[in-house]
Image (tube, rainbow, N blue to C red):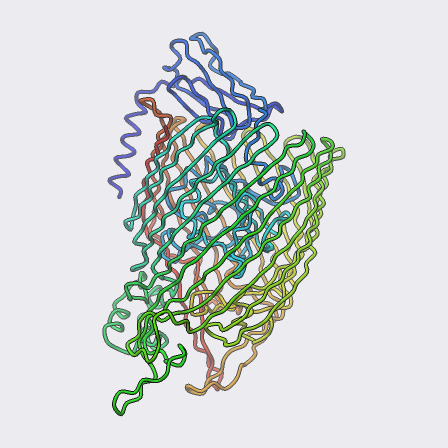
Amino acid sequence: MFKQLIASLALCLVVLSGFSQDRLVIKVIDENQKPLPGTTVSLNQSNSVTNEAGVAEFQAPVIQKNFTLKVSHVGYSTVTQIIRPNTALQITIQLKMASIQTGEIFVYGTRAKENSATTYTNISKEEIQKKNLGQDIPYLLDQTPGVVIGSDAGAGIGYTNMTIRGSDNQRINVTLNGIPLNDAESMGSFFVNLPDFASSTQSIQVQRGIGTSTNGAGAFGASLNIQTDILESEPYAELNNSFGSYNSWKNTLKVGSGLLHNKYAFNARLSRIASDGYIERASSDLKSFYVDGGLYTDKHILKATLFSGKEKTYQAWYGTPEPLIKGDRALLSDYAGALEIYGGTELDRLLNADRRYNYYTYDNQTDNYTQTHTHLHYTNIINDKLSINSALHYTRGAGYYEEYRAGDKLAKYNMSPVTIGSETIEATDLIRRRWLDNHFYGLTYGLNYNPSNNLKFTLGGAYNQYRGDHYGQVIWARFASTSELGDKYYFNDAQKNDFNIYAKTDYSIGNWLINLDIQYRNLYYRIDGDDDKIKNLDFEDRLNFLNPKVGFTYFVNPQSNFYASYAYANKEPVRKDYVENPLNEFPKPEKMQDIEAGYRFKNESFNMGANVYGMFYKDQLINTGALNDVGGTIRQNVDDSYRIGVEFDGAWTISPQFVWRATAAVSDNKIKNFVEYNSVYDGWDFVELKAVTYDKTNISMSPSTVLSNDLTYSPIKPLSFSFISKYVSRMYLDNTSAKERSIDPSFVNHVRAVYSFSTWGIERIDLNLSVNNIFNAKYQTNGYTWGSMDTAGNRSYYNFYYPQAETNFMLGLNIRF
């Protein structure tokens, strides 16, 4: 690995030695004199893209004779002019808005606007491209405030997880071009079902807290608004390949027609990502495609998008026992009993394992799922003050996870006992599949009315329906009784209807910007039939939510402003809260008040934002620390809890060669008067649930401090080296603040080298090397715990963790024609 790194650096230094230090600097601005990052600048066969300051640079040798300069940006008219040898080495180009609109109007109603009273971070396409080597979308967001990421397989490919302000993906609202991605029942967003979607992403906005009114599930930690690639006026083709540790591969082919006949455009992508995983057998085989086609005119946009992902991942959600993480092997015999491993090769494997241990060994212990999305967007730009956009969507998902079960009771699978001679067999080894077969469809709409520069109105909403079947099948049994292949040992039907409507107003007066926002949401959720755990699981829940928001921004000057906001929101329980409530209670919806205040400053060399927040919950559904039998967290309502914190996000261009970016999130996350219920056993016999009360305790999996750092050095424009760091403080596995049931703090460092150039008529070639965890830290970012008490009050517990990869690398080669 390090030989490859040295070779790449040597190549870069050889290339550098041939360059002059004189440069032609092109600065691109818009009609408001603001820089235009992401603008394509071409000097005959040499190409560049403007940075965040709107600047592109070329080496002096390319301007020794007359050249044609071409400057183009989607949504703006292209500028072409002749560059002569005596031209000044610094040129400013102003672009004017073109009549053809971009795809940004599709996310207009759900994104926070610049300077609005909402805490947010934008991640541009340029940033995404630098990091996109095959790891999942959460890994691309690692340097945003308060984000903690992890991976079941340990290396960022396959099942990944993310928390923002301590809130997991069930509380993070995700939309794709304004259309909900969160699963209607679990509320999770599973990016493993959309492998390599980052390669079709134009930008991502991360809103922390409640955020703006949007479609889909309520945001109780953050919102992710993902915008797919916008219109490109010129045809292109891209070939992106990555290879790295643990036999990890990413292969992507992208093509686009450009704008045909000044009105039509088509794009397509085909991707494959594969990895053996850092954890034993935690392999991933992920495939996806993306196709879109659009009609673009002065007044109308009609765009159809079809994308699909197919994943097969080996299960690694069981985690690694704590003794293998911390080296206390004397405890392994206790954990073996808890894992029901009593001898033989499995016990030997456990006793001789390391932190990469995987409990599962069955060859096809895999998750298999295919998800296909169809979107149809239409926008009517009636005039410069009024526009209407709408979308129809349909998502089809189907798949199963397969697992080997040893000694399960036949009765659980509706099978009769088997009699062989005088022996009656009531349990058997078997292989089962648990299926999810679902449909999600609906429409979204928005009307945008801007009667003046000082006043803007948005009226929007959505109506969505979900239909899902949950069922299980036994595909093999050592003793199958009278069962037939295809029999379902449980079948459960779910239906969810979700209607919402919202209105927003932005009003400017003097130095003030006022944001008003209110959303009404109506939900109907019904379940009929047998669940794997509960027979006759029949219930329905009807909920009505009113979610208001108000914000103020005060502009000190064009570079800085203060803002403050108040928001109130409600959120419904998820499926497992109804099925697996540890207190056997019907779950309550959650309520939250969110207060945010901050300061923003931006000039050509410095960009920063500081924010304080208070999120105050009623009936929050918090993780107990335990998992169900498929790796999902078990939750319970708590009366009173809060998250209070301070966040910082800044970037400083120290010089043309050095850029320093840093984030910080410091918080206090507490439950007031928490009551924990412990199962008490007398030997093997259950006795009671014992209540233990805590006056004030930490919310599980909510670190108090998250820091990140990115120092980038660019000796010349095409080449950059970055040193990246991340610190995450202690996280508690349950809600007792017990250090013995916690995840140790972690400090992890990475380096990245990026070199971009053009040659032989190729528009752009990118070499990207990322070496992760360069100091070989042994760390974890997720885990769980479970246990019980005996009648004397002695507590036993078992901690399991998800170890993250040691030093590893990914090397990428991207070619764009």
Residue 44 in percent (x, y) is at: 39, 17
Residue 762 in percent (x, y) is at: 34, 25
Residue 623 in view (yes/no): no
**In the picture shown, does residue 530 fall above or below 370?**
below
**In the picture shown, does residue 634 fall above or below 30?**
below
Residue 770 in percent (x, y) is at: 35, 41
Give me the residue at 30% from left, 25% from top.
Answer: 15
Q: Quadrant of the N terminus?
A: top left
Q: Is residue 686 left or right of residue 584?
A: left
Q: Quadrant of the C terminus?
A: top left
**In the picture shown, does residue 514 fall above or below 779?**
above
**In the picture shown, does residue 185 fall above or below 626?**
above
Quarter-wise, where is residue 606 in the image?
top right
Q: Is residue 208 left or right of residue 382?
A: left
Give the farthest residue toward the right.
509
Quarter-wise, where is residue 587 in the image?
bottom right
Residue 375 in view (yes/no): yes
Give the farthest residue toward the bottom.
422
Residue 268 in percent (x, y) is at: 41, 37
Give the farthest residue toward the top.
86
Q: Which one is in front, 522 or 605? A: 522
In this figure, what is the number of numbered marks?
Answer: 0
Q: Is residue 100 left or right of residue 348?
A: right
